[in-house]
Amino acid sequence: MATGAQAQGSDTTDKSWSLTIHGGAGVIERENLTEEKDREVRAALTRALEAGSEVLSGGGTSMDAVQAAIIVLEDDPNFNAGRGSVFTYKGRNEMDAAIMDGKTLDAGSAAGVTATKNPIKLARAVMEQSPHVLLSRDGANEFSMEQELEQAGPQWFATDERYRQLEELKARQAEDEASGSGAKTSYFDIDMKYGTVGAVAVDMDGNMAAGTSTGGLTGKRWGRIGDSPIIGAGTYADNRACAISATGAGEYFIRLGVAHEICARMRMKGEDAKTAADAVIKELGELGGTGGVIVAAPDGTAAWSYNTPGMYRGRATSAGMKQVGIYGDEE
């Protein structure tokens, strides 16, 4: 782990950087993805890595790199964020996002926004242009327009596949209600495919950042908010320990405070990123939750951990590494 001075972003000797991204975790197996979908996802992950890497290799900040990578994924309908976000029960797209600066511990997030083309930009605006950390729904929409962020209509976010998923979920809920079983499983993604996107980075100055963006759960009701915009649950960054973005069953990530818990293990126990992440994801599974995390350490090393069959993921470093993966056997 880096020394205290390095963790606060002091000058580094090698000017190295690293970037790690994810596009969701779940039951992602070769037999479930067509060759075309496999290619599309890998191409999108590669574009996101290239966008963030261009920032970092040019001496840019980890904050800018995280935002650049996430924007690429928000604009791609293969992921549940921005364009391609899932539908609520009432047929709307309501999006959440968060971003955090590991140097200052400044953070911003937005929940239930409906018209900001790139919600990660709104999260950053909340951090930099407001006195608050978390804004939601109508207030977040109003703030977005005041900041003159690009807005988009429902037709930008909506896709036929996401609407099909909503109709399928409603049909399962109707079956549950008709059976009188009282089952609640149909309120969640039965296929366990969480297309949330995120990025973590360490820049040449040793500063870290994390960001996450999501459309939430298909068929979510009552203004439900998951872990992505909750600082310490789905998103966290601290130069003293790590930067983290999560994806999965948000209710469980909130209950465990997964992102902060991993950082605390690294900071207080001296565990490396992989050890800390594996331990907390194991605890998540024991509680009944599924999903995964990406983690970056102050020295530029990175790791991911998930308890699902696969996770859309990728990483790039100043040493020339560039890797994307989908399935569990691509470590």
Image (cartoon, rainbow, N blue to C red):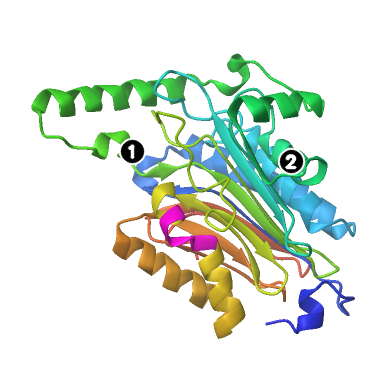
Task: Measuring from the top left, give residue 82's x and y in whole percent.
Answer: 61, 31
Camera-side mark, 2 or 1: 2
- 262 up-or-down from 139: above or below: below
Q: CA distance from mark 2 to mark 1?
A: 29 Å
- Sooner in the amino-acid sequence: mark 2 or mark 1: 2
Residue beneath the point at 54% across and 34% down: 78
Q: Nearer the viewer, residue 103 or 139?
A: 139
Q: Looking at the image, which residue sits at the far front?
A: 131
Residue beneath the point at 67% across and 25% down: 141
- 92 horizontally vs 13: left or right: left
Residue beneath the point at 71% across and 46% down: 69
Amino acid bearing label 1? Phe
Circle 1 crowding by C-alpha within 10 Å: few under 14, some 14–19, many from 20: some
SS at badge 2: helix
Specify whether residue 296 is in view. Answer: yes
Task: Measuring from the top left, give residue 281's x and y in whole percent.
Answer: 42, 65
SS at badge 1: loop
Checking the image for residue 188, the label placed there is: 1
- 74 up-or-down from 178: above or below: below
- Considering the whole magenta stretch, tell me its main secondary structure: helix
Checking the image for residue 126, the label placed there is: 2
- 217 horizontally vs 245: left or right: left
Q: Quadrant of the N terminus?
A: bottom right
Q: In which quarter of the view is residue 109 placed? A: top right
Task: Measuring from the top left, give residue 48's x and y in whole percent.
Answer: 69, 46
- Region rendered in magenta: 254-259
